[in-house]
Image: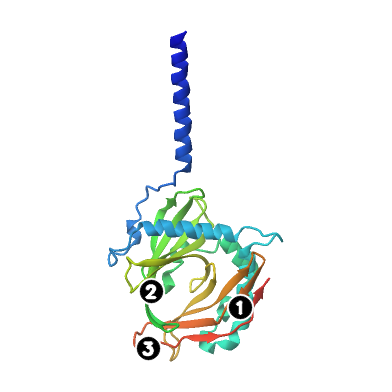
Amino acid sequence: MLISEHVEGMLETHIRLRILLLMLVCFLPARSNADWSWVVPSEYPAIDSSLFEKGVKEAEKFRRNLLLKNAAGLTQAEILSEAVVRFQKLVGDHLAKENNVKGFRLKRKRLFQAIEGENRGLEPEQAFLAFEGKWYGIWDKMEVDHQWYPQINQHPPVKVDGFNPFWVHAVQFAWIGDGFGWNVVASEKEDADEYYILGTVFHVRDKDPEQVYLHRPHVGISVSEDRLIWLTAGEVFLEERIPAQDDLPERYTITGFNYQMNGRAQLSVRGNSFQAVYSRNPDSRIPWRQFWINLTAP
């Protein structure tokens, strides 16, 4: 009888330990076995490659949050899509003819579908090629030397583990003057024909990659091979690579606005809208432009 009770006690203790172990495993943060060292160029040995995984996970979380519905049944992705379309229609009067954004030809439904990950027209191997290379310009009052590195494609795609795993098909590293980051083509399924774009930017002090002080997740929309839209929690950027024509050099324009959300129901512009124009010539830096646009959505 005593032996039986002892065995039952040991068994009960063993079961409790197994349950405790399972609970610990469930609540521990997921760790990835993927090697991300290939996403950091050799010129930047001080950059910790684990920042890539951290950044794209936060960008994916941001994308999923954009797709959550508010009390009125609208998502922030829909509100942002409407705001971008309105901005394109209003901004023309404030821009030089050669640097306008008419070529974007935006439609709200298409923008929303791209955020959802239903962009069948996006070719992962072509997503960022047009922007590759060095660009020079002025951002606000800061001279910027901006470099988009060659895009690296992955066949098969690389899995990013987590509660909502996703797959990376292409990566491009960028140095943006006051920081660095990555542009990523991703999908929710490994064998996918629909993709979406994520971005992650880490801002640094004194151009030192080891002094990161701010991280901003991005969600991207590929409009065409020469045109991208980037969304953050407070900014929208319409980016375009414009080929050289007649006396005008090749240019890279970034046109956008800062915004704030009033709860999850309405978007309004905060402060000035802007345009930066970069060129391939470090001795020819085109001035930064600011202008006011009154815009709300929906």
Mark 1 surroundings: few (<14), some (14-19) or many (≥20) residues within 10 A: many
The residue where tag 1 is placed is 87
Q: Please determine whether, in this image, residue 244 is positioned above or below residue 181.
A: below
Q: Which residue is mark 3?
A: 284
Label 3 vs label 2, nearer the camera:
2
Question: Which secondary structure lies at badge 2?
Answer: loop
Q: Residue furthest bottom?
A: 247
For residue 18, which numbered disc appears in the image? none
Point out which mark residue 178 bears.
Answer: 2
Judge the density around disc 3: few (<14), some (14-19), many (≥20) Cα neighbours within 10 Å.
few
The percent coordinates of residue 105 (x first, y second) are 60, 76
Q: In the displayed structure, does residue 237 sit left or right of residue 72?
A: left
Asked whether residue 270 is in view, the answer is yes
Query: Residue at image x 50%, y 48%?
Result: 163
Residue type at the position of mark 2 = Asp
Q: Nearer the viewer, residue 156 or 14?
A: 14
**As drawn, is 297 to the left or to the right of 182?**
right
Give the Cα separation between the discs numbered 1 and 2: 27 Å
Coordinates of residue 59 in the picture (x, y in percent)? 49, 60
At x 35% / y 85%, what residue is drawn? 281
CB within 8 Å, label 1 to label 2:
no
**Within-10-Å neighbours for mark 2: few <14, some 14–19, many 20+:** many
Q: Amino acid at mark 1?
A: Phe
Count of numbered circles on the image: 3
The numbered mark, 3 or 2, whose residue comes first in the sequence reads 2
Q: Earlier in the sequence, mark 1 or mark 3?
A: 1
Furthest residue toward right: 72
**Vertical position of residue 240 compared to residue 263: above or below:** below
Q: Secondary structure at mark 1?
A: helix
